[in-house]
Amino acid sequence: MIRLKALELLEKSGKTKYWLYKQLGMSYQNFNKMINNETKSIRYENIETLCLLLECTPNELLEITEG
């Protein structure tokens, strides 16, 4: 399973979940599902934007976990 580590990266950068939501410009429902790892897919565009906003690489943003 692939897990998005956006919340951990947000905490390290001192930014809030609300700040990220406003920057991404997506519906809150879709944002919340993505951030809480409750979605089955994420657009490349969103991965790129997350990396730019959180100043990280895709490798730092995503991690593979067991089951």
Image: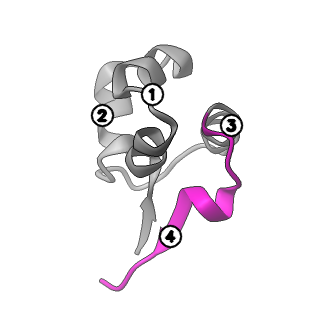
Residue under numbered circle 2? 32
Residue under numbered circle 3? 45
Q: Kindly report which numbered mark, 4 or 3, lies closer to the viewer in this rendering.
A: 4
46 in magenta: no
SS of the residue at dot 1?
A: loop
Quarter of the image where one finds residue 11: top left
SS of the residue at dot 3?
A: helix
The residue closer to the viewer here, 62 or 19, is 19
Rendered view: 9 above or below 52: below
Ranked by sequence position, the earlier of labels 1 and 2 is: 1
Ranked by sequence position, the earlier of labels 3 and 2 is: 2
Residue drawn at 36 percent across, 28 percent down: 17
- In whole angstroms, how far apart are the C-alphas of marks 1 and 4? 21 Å
Q: Is residue 59 left or right of residue 22?
A: right
Q: Which residues are magenta?
A: 54-67
Ranked by sequence position, the earlier of labels 4 and 2 is: 2
Residue under numbered circle 1? 15
Ranked by sequence position, the earlier of labels 4 and 3 is: 3
